[in-house]
Image (tube, coloured by chain):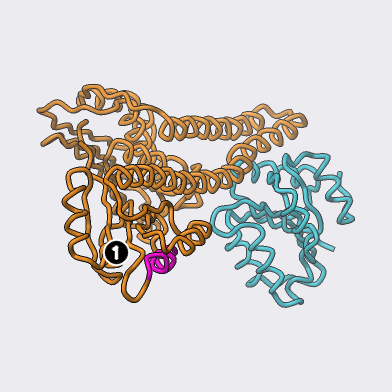
Amino acid sequence: MRLSFIVVEHAEIDIYIVTELIRKVLKEAEVEVFLTAEKALDHIVINKVAATERKVILLDLMMPKMDGASFISLFEALPRHIRANYQIVIVTSSMNKTELERLGKRRDVEMIIEKPLTRDKFRSLLAKINVEGN
Amino acid sequence: MSEKLKVLYIDDERDNLIGFKATFRSEYRILLAENMVQATEHLEMNPDLRVIICDQRMPGKTGVEFFEEIRTRFPLPVRILITGFADIEAVISAINRGNIFRYIRKPWIAEDIISAIDEGSKFYIATSMLSIKNQELQQAYTELDKFAYSVSHDLRGPLTGILGAIDIAREMSDINEIKELLLLVEKSVFKLEDYISSMHDYHSSQRGELKIVDIDFNQVADELQDVYRIYTTTNKIRFKVTVNQLEAFRSDELVIKMILNNLITNAIKYQKKNFQDKNIELSIDVHDVMAKIVISDTGIGIPESHFEEIFNLFSRATSHRAGSGIGLYNVRSALLKLGGNIEVSSVVGEGTVFKLTIPSK
């Protein structure tokens, strides 16, 4: 099964960190970066994913225009055959515990990682979605 | 001297009306009404009316009934009733229900009326101050909510980025990779620094006292050009400044500089990438105790739908550049404080023009 990542993030430094971590820890995985939630959503709707592919969405919450929470709501409204290949992992610096708790319970949200995203946290993410890293 | 306070007197007997006005016209601005219709008209026309005095015995409706009726529509003016001894029951219940502030017994003497009006006016001031303070407090709460969001987004965001960068740097051995990362760390630090200095501006534009001095705009312009030369040269932006000041101009120099700095920084920040002919023009014209300042740029522009919104706290018109959404808010509050104003016009993809007018103090 092929694993790939969709990064939805607008801060330059965070994009660098996340792509660097994926590159270093996984070697094989594919990464696509989207600066806005709208663009990521468009991509998900248009692109067909093979049944053998697994896609992890690393989603920032606080973004201008469409934020992470709205992204999740719109994603949930997509047809099942599209959603089936995706898992959402929230990566955020938000301190709003109530909102995070609420979002953590959403159907397609696999887990929440609090920034800073470190090697350890990234490895625990891989463990959670049953992928072995280096 | 400040304007006389407005008092409305309602009585169905013309002689009483004339007598009342004759007695108090030098102290107050007296408005007269023979019936409730006229009284309501006065209330509608004079939102600054402070005290209403009404006779209890009126044809159709008693004074107490009238007060009860207008209370929700015109809550601010203080209500005083004039009445004979016979109506005392009605008066007591009206006081207890909060419909009247005072009652004056007939036949009245001038001292009683004056004391009731003065007390009523004090009460009016206290109540209206309270409602103004309440509005300000509400506004402050709203800003605080937005601030809480902004702290995690604009302060914690760059910080966690830096921490993440440090973590991956530990496993890096290639010095070039580390240098690339340091560049990003530096950008995050600048973002934090920007944020802190705009918070400082925010605080001083909200709370600071004005320090009015003579301002020489030629000197201000020279300073600005010196400060921004390094940015404009490295970004290949032509920065043209013209000043036309033949008369004295008095205002707060730090506040004026803060305004100009914010607008110039924006003009630099929001230039189009890969555009050859980048321009920023600043013109300052002082004429008839008024400074007219125009800042225009050849930047990415602002959609018309955002013209109002950009001046709100923590609002941002664009998603792809750094910015905390405090700068233009500070600009507008500072201008309000100086008694000036700001207008924006812009064409997306072509550029933006900010026009400011600031009166000399």
Q: Which colour is chain B painted?
A: orange
Q: Position of residue B5 (x, y in %)?
A: 26, 46
Q: Is residue B151 above or below residue A126?
A: above
The quarter in which the N terminus of chain A is drawn is bottom right
Q: Is residue B138 left or right of residue B302?
A: right
Residue, x 80% and y 48% (percent of image)? A26
At label 1, counting other C-alpha atoms closer than 10 Å, the crowd grade (few under 14, some 14-19, many 20 or more) is few
In the image, B348 versus B68, the foreground residue is B68
The region drawn magenta spans B62-72
Q: What residue is disc 1 on? A: B44
Residue sitting nearer the eye, B101 or B88: B88
Residue B106 drawn in magenta: no
Q: Nearer the viewer, residue A43 or B177?
A: A43
Please tell me whether mark 1 sits on a helix, a strand or a loop: helix
Rendering colour (chain A): cyan
Residue B69 in the magenta stretch? The answer is yes
Going 65% across and 34% down the picture, which residue do you hit? Answer: B159
Q: Classify residue B302 as left or right of residue A19.
A: left
Residue type at mark 1 is Glu
Point 80% across, 45% down: residue: A122
| Chain of the residue under label 1 | B
Can see residue A19? Answer: no
B46 lies left or right of A112: left
Q: Splitting the image into 4 quarters, where does residue A16 fall? A: top right
| Residue at position x 59%, y 49% in the image | A10
Point out the image quarter for the C terminus of chain A. Answer: top right
